[in-house]
Amino acid sequence: MKPLQVESCAPLLGDSGAAQLLRTQVAAFAEVDTPVLLEGERGTGREHLARLLHICSRRRQAAFIRIDAEFADTERAAEKLRRAHGGSVLLKDLPHGTLRLRKLLMQWLDKNLALLTSGEEGMPLRVFATTDVELPRLIEAGLVAPELLQKLGVLRLSVPPLRERSADIPRLCEHFLSELSIQSGAPIRTLAPRALDQVMRYSWPGNLAELRDVMRRAALRAREPAIQLADVEMVLPPLHQRVPIEELSLAETVRTKLRALLQRLEGYPITDLYEEVLAHVERPLLEEVLLRTAGNQIKAATMLGINRNTLRKKLQLYALGGATSEPEGDARKC
């Protein structure tokens, strides 16, 4: 088994308790073929860890295939699963996939288990999945079928946000600046003490991904071997914008998500973004309202301010089952 490549994997760097626990878990999970559910906020390095688990396993010579659940259609996902046979597949952002995609994954997990227990030659597929929604809420909201979570969540890897491992920030800054030097061929830059103090005070809602981006932009701005406070301040969000992500208004939160989405799609042909974005806003809205109304369609339609028949059509469109209705007379009593 290939040893962990800690020095090349940012989520594992540092001496904090969170980083040490993560290293221990990853080392153990690399030894087995069990599916792994990687939980954590966006930007924490979940995909990087999944790739590392693959590289350090006996599957490292086989394919590692990534499926983005938010944008994958079922037919294309099925083809990718076939290509990944003998290797590993990462289903990114599991809760945001369609019901058909999750059913397809369930079928492949069952097939994988059958191959594993039958003794058939050839390595079955290993599955990784990421979620930015905590497991209890996934179950409570019905975002993913319990049977699928049972198969995927045998091994769970909770990837901590950067704010819970702030002691690792200096080591991570060194890593990202060294990484930039290798990529660009420029000398490695360091952080001046005041610049590092500023970095340590920031809350990093975008986690490792945001820290990497800030180090890159600060290094490109710097005119001295050491990055100065002014360089960091120029690339960090203005002070009035530095609020915890949970305190952002709905419009600001949506804008932040859309900005990140467009950055991820840069360079890819985009033809149906309007419908995609509406679907990914409308579906969770319907799920949350149904959860709040205990699945009662009459109450949900009233809360949403739409016709009950319109609600039914939308529930059918998104394959959101399990909703109940009440007689009109009962509804008027509420």
Image (spheres, rainbow, N blue to C red):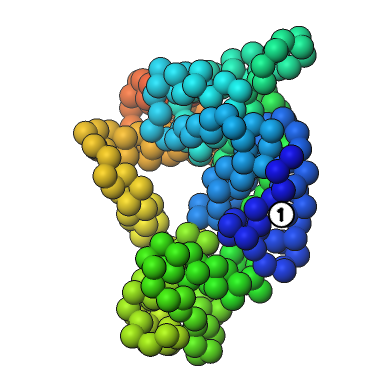
Residue 146's image quarter?
top right
Look at 38% across and 37% down and name the residue there: 280
Disc tally is 1
Look at 24% across and 33% down and name the residue there: 272
Q: Position of residue 244 (x, y in %)?
A: 50, 67
Residue 231 seen in render:
yes
In the image, farthest residue toward the left = 271
Residue 180 to residue 331: above or below: below
In the image, farthest residue toward the bottom = 194
Q: Nearer the viewer, residue 74 or 30?
A: 30
Direction from residue 56 to residue 229 in the image, left or right = left
Residue 203 seen in render:
no
Local SS, label 1: helix
Q: Position of residue 204 (x, y in %)?
A: 51, 68
Residue 153 to residue 115: above or below: below
Direction from residue 29 to residue 11 in the image, left or right = left
What amino acid type should be assigned to the residue bearing mark 1? Leu
Look at 70% across and 43% down and name the residue there: 2
Q: Position of residue 263 (x, y in %)?
A: 32, 52
Residue 6's image quarter?
bottom right
Q: Position of residue 63 (x, y in %)?
A: 53, 30
Q: Nearer the viewer, residue 181 or 10?
A: 181
Q: Where the N terminus falls, by quadrant?
A: top right
Direction from residue 205 to residue 11 in the image, left or right = right
Q: Nearer the viewer, residue 1 or 313?
A: 1
Direction from residue 142 to residue 118 in the image, left or right = right
Residue 218's image quarter?
bottom left
Look at 59% across and 64% down and name the residue there: 162
Task: Please rate how many residues cluster around mark 1, counting C-alpha atoms within 10 Å: few if below 14, some from 14 to 19, many from 20.
Answer: many
| Label 1 sits on residue | 22
